Image: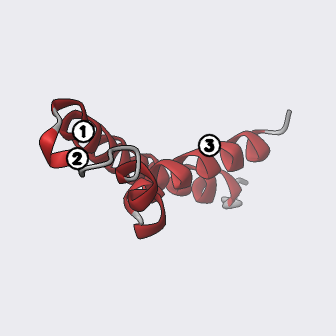
Amino acid sequence: MNKNVKLLYCLLGSAVLALLNTPVLSYAKLGVFQSGYGGSVLGELLIHITNVLSLVGFILLILFSIVLILSNIKFNTK
């Protein structure tokens, strides 16, 4: 598989991780608990885990974007 295609798949996965804290997905993860997540230890743990995964997604998104850009720059080699 081409290196650029692999990097694009990595970018797509990182973007999905980064979007964990968007309003659409936050309502979905909070809808699991009937009385809200504040009354449950599992709910608090779920919120903290998704916050950390979202941060990791943003970091990976930046990293893979830079790698993809650098791999496509044609340097003048003589």
Q: Residue 9 got which mark?
A: none
- Alpha carbon separation for disc pair 3 and 2: 31 Å
Tag shown at residue 37? 2
Mark 1 vs mark 3: give the one in front: 1
Q: Earlier in the sequence, mark 1 or mark 3?
A: 3
The image shows residue 35, relative to residue 52, as above or below, that is: below
Asked which secondary structure carries label 1, the reply is helix
What colour scheme was applied to this rendering of the protein? secondary structure
Q: Residue at x 17, y 36 (%)?
A: 40
Which of the two residues, 59 or 74, is positioned nearer the viewer here? 59
Query: What kind of element bears circle 3?
Result: helix
Query: What residue appears at the point 70 percent right and 57 percent down from the top-left corner?
Result: 72
The residue that disc 3 covers is: 10
Percent of width and height locating residue 61:
48, 53
Instruction: Pinpoint residue 76: horizontal percent, then vertical percent.
Output: 69, 61
Q: Position of residue 32 (x, y in %)?
A: 40, 44
Which residue, given by chain and number where applicable, does mark 1 sit on?
A: 43
Q: Can residue 48 be seen at all in this image of the molecule?
A: yes
Point 73% across, 39% down: residue = 6
- Above or below — where is 13 with respect to 61? above
User: What whole-number distance in Å separates the C-alpha atoms at marks 1 and 3?
Assistant: 29 Å
- Identify which residue, 13 or 37, lies in the foreground: 37
Q: What kind of residue is marked 2?
A: Tyr
